[in-house]
Amino acid sequence: MEKKISIEELKLKIDEIKADLQKHNGDPFLAIIEAWYYKVEILLAHDYFFKQEFLNELVSYKLKCQEIYSGNSVSDIGKRKQIIQELVEKFFSEKLGSNDDMIANNNDGLIRSVKDVTNSIRFCNFERGDLIFRGQRNSEWDVLPSLFRKYQDIDNALMYEAVLIGQIFNGIKSPFMNSYDPMEQLMVAQHFGMPTRLVDWTSDVLIALFFACYDPKNENCDQNGRLYLTEKLNFKKFNTNSSELSEYQKPLRVEKLETYKERFNINEIYFLEPILKNPRMRFQDGCFMFFPWKFNEADNELLGLNRFIRENRKWVEEYNKRNVEKIDYLFFAHKEIDKEFKKEILLELDKVYGISEKSLFLDSKYSDDVVNHFNVLNNHAEIKTSELSKKNKSKLQSNSSDL
């Protein structure tokens, strides 16, 4: 078994890499590519230092280097090289001692201050709006739509969603709705506490950090939080504002029932961001992922983000084995928040950045009425789902006894 090296030894090995320009007849670009190729080889050989997302990026970069060596055309190599360089340099700065203050307080990679986050997000070289973020106060949780947490049984989840959007079929719009689009109903309902197939994300990393620490009922004080980030371009964009949706400006007609049904018939995760946002969405810089029920038709399991990422990686690996032109893994990253520092982080977010419960949750008489509206709708949906579930069970038992 190979002896594990220390951080210091790894740094020395990487520092010894030199680009031999003579080998490439003075071509500095190829020399740099080869130097980085060897650096990646060393990092991959000591993978116990790294998160899986970082390893995936390194493997992707190594494949790009191989394409250059073989003389094949390479798509977007400049951007990928820059991203990987920034990734590795981030690792050096956080783990190999270029920032003594950070090393002293964050040598295990956990987030313990707002500064830890602002230092970390610079590694990707993305502009604002390219990345989206999500905070969860328990690092052990999957990223799962609230509807799937409430109802693990797909039939009950389907029934609840049907009741949730059912009022639209009677020509009734919820507050903050500007059309009869069922997706608009889901987006508003999600932000006022009803379980849906949507998962909240935000374009502001500090708002995501707030939600990774925010625990009003103190139910996860003994758990680390987790901060996720991903690139919006990983996902197809769900249509929320086009001329194709003009039919939703009027109440539903019976002959359009299938159109409504088809709008929710998706087989992969979509990204969506409404043009018009309700106040809570606006304050939280909110956007969403819209989840299909299952990964494929043969599944009985409701889909979570971790399963989606695993299945995607398997598919990419198989594709790259069969094809010369390689494709990249979906870009996901995450960091844990130290449970002992959650309260300090919340205090810093409030005092320095003005991010708090009061600033993110609309507090007005009208907002109270909206919350009450969705509480009533939620109670109605729960009761109807329970009634329909009992009827289905009774029907199944009756059919079983007839056999």
Image (cartoon, rainbow, N blue to C red):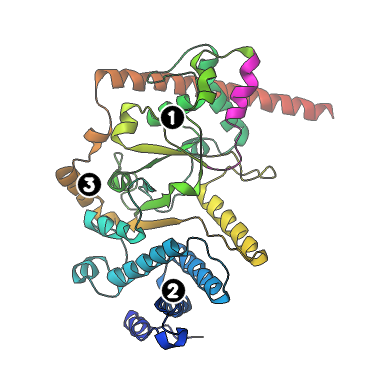
Label 1 Cα crowd, 10 Å radius (few <14 / some 14-19 / many 20+): many
Q: Answer whether residue 343 is magenta in the image.
A: no
Closer mark to the observer between disc 2 and disc 1: 1
Residue 206 picture location, percent across and down: 27, 47
Label 3 Cα crowd, 10 Å radius (few <14 / some 14-19 / many 20+): many
Label 2 Cα crowd, 10 Å radius (few <14 / some 14-19 / many 20+): few
Closer mark to the observer between disc 1 and disc 3: 1
Magenta: predominant secondary structure element?
helix
Q: Quadrant of the C terminus?
A: top right
The residue beneath circle 3 is: 346
Quadrant in the rendering for residue 110: bottom left
Q: Tell me the element at label 1.
A: helix
Taking the spot 28% from the left edge, 31% from the top edge, the residue there is 361
Mark 3 belongs to which amino acid? Answer: Leu
The residue beneath circle 2 is: 48
Q: Does residue 318 appear in this view?
A: yes
The residue beneath circle 1 is: 187
Q: Viewed as shown, does residue 173 lie left or right of 107?
A: right
Taking the spot 74% from the left edge, 28% from the top edge, the residue there is 397
Q: Tell me the element at label 3.
A: helix
Q: Which residues are magenta?
A: 255-269
Tell which circle, 2 or 1, labels the residue nearer the N-terminal end.
2
Q: Viewed as shown, does residue 90 lie left or right of 375?
A: left
The answer to whether the residue labelled 2 contacts the one labelled 3, judged by CB atoms less than 8 Å apart, is no
The answer to whether the residue labelled 2 contacts the one labelled 1, judged by CB atoms less than 8 Å apart, is no
Tell which circle, 1 or 3, labels the residue nearer the N-terminal end.
1
